[in-house]
Amino acid sequence: MAQRKDRGRHRFGPAGLAAAQQLSRAGHTVIVYERDDAVGGLLRYGIPEFKMEKSVIDRRLVQLRGEGIRFRTGVAIGAEGHLSLEDLRSRFDAVVLATGSTVPRDIGAENAKSEGVYPAMEYLVPANRESLGAERGIDAEGKHVVIVGGGDTGADCYGTAIRQGAASVTQLDIRLQPTDERPGHQPWPTYPLIHRVGDSHEEGGERVFGVNTLEVLTNDDGSTRALKIVEGERIDGRFDAYAGTEREIPADLVLIALGFTGPDSVVDPAGLLPRTKRGNFEREDDYAVPGEEGLFVAGDAGRGQSLIVWAIAEGRAAAATVDAYLTGASILPVPVKASDNPITV
Ligand SMILES: Cc1cc2nc3c(=O)[nH]c(=O)nc-3n(C[C@H](O)[C@H](O)[C@H](O)COP(=O)(O)OP(=O)(O)OC[C@H]3O[C@@H](n4cnc5c(N)ncnc54)[C@H](O)[C@@H]3O)c2cc1C
């Protein structure tokens, strides 16, 4: 085969895997570096097995390997003793950063570092490994579990805690409970803010809306015993508490699922890459990093925590830019630009 001299390289969740597949199919040699022991990103160890079976990723990996893509797991690019981003850029013609966005947002409540309070991913990752045969990590069995954060990550913690046999599961949402119908000011094709009931919510537990967490209350030994919460509503982005509505709810295990603030700094320990105001890696509309020859950013690392479909679409689109960068032109499809969002697409 008349192999092009070009080579590409990626970090891999769905964005990286999608980019790798497209570039390989365009005739490039592609190597995937992944710091975990298996590729797949949040699909592998973030999203619970009961929501997305890992066999789906494994089936796709068979295809990717068969197409010639090579995988190097256990390599944390930028970490001490591992390859650096500079190493990659000097050895390869193009590098796609698809490192995700996994730095958790803080709860901002008093005593939040108490024993028994964990970021959601510290709970979900070992729980996912357990479903693949490992020992249980943080255990919800017999505990009063409170999840702070009303989104999908919180719902995954919810379903997992129910499966582990929690004594009670409560999910706190700072937003007031949305209506069941699409509000008039959110016409199609706007993604409507309506009350959604996930599979996990149908299995038990309780959801509490319109509350903020003030403090983590502890036992004498420092372990968590309750959360102090207050009712209210957000007005212009600020939570306005209703006077006299403070109360305690029992909590032995508190899981913080308040979203993510951007990619961590492992890949760029010196902080040389440009970041957006929201903390993500900056890129042009075609995924090229401004002022950085041969470097591209795709998926959550550039968009912020989003959805699998966006990660895949971005990976495929970034591959088209990389292909054109390496060869002068590309016939690969460009499903989305980096600045596209769900409302405009
Ligand atoms: C709990 C949870 C549940 C979710 N559920 C859904 C859902 O149901 N539906 C949906 O559409 N979306 C869901 N999402 C969002 C979705 O998982 C992400 O938007 C998507 O995985 C982003 O893909 P990505 O490839 O950009 O990043 P990631 O999936 O985060 O992958 C990044 C990869 O890069 C690796 N990496 C990072 N840094 C380095 C480094 N320095 N060196 C080497 N490798 C590195 C990571 O280990 C990881 O494998 C969920 C997210 C979470 C957290």
Image: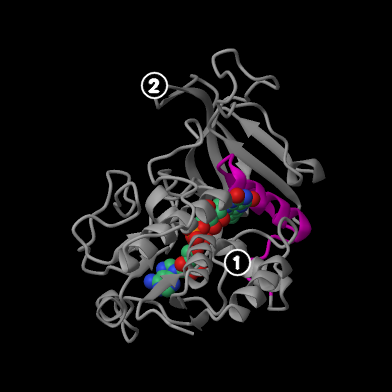
Q: Pick the residue in front: 244 or 163.
A: 163
Left or right of 199? Residue 80 is: left
Please provide percent x and percent y for residue 190. 55, 26
Residue reaching furthest to the top: 184
Quote the CA–CA distance across marks 1 and 2.
36 Å
For the point 68% across and 73% down, the residue is: 58
Left or right of 167? Residue 221 is: left
Q: Range of the magenta residues?
A: 136-164
Q: Marks 1 and 2: which is nearer the front?
A: 1
Q: Which of the labelled discs sits on residue 236, or is there none? A: 2
- Using the rendered image of the protein, determine whether residue 222 is visible from the camera's viewpoint: no
- Using the rendered image of the protein, determine whether residue 226 is visible from the camera's viewpoint: yes
Please provide percent x and percent y for residue 241. 47, 23
Q: Residue 138: within the magenta?
A: yes
For the point 57% across and 50% down, the residue is: 309
Q: Earlier in the sequence, mark 1 or mark 2?
A: 1
Label pair 1/2, CB-CB below 8 angstroms: no
Q: Pick the residue in front: 176 or 263.
A: 263
Q: Residue 213: within the magenta?
A: no
Q: Which residue is mark 1?
A: 45
Identify the secondary structure beneath mark 1. helix
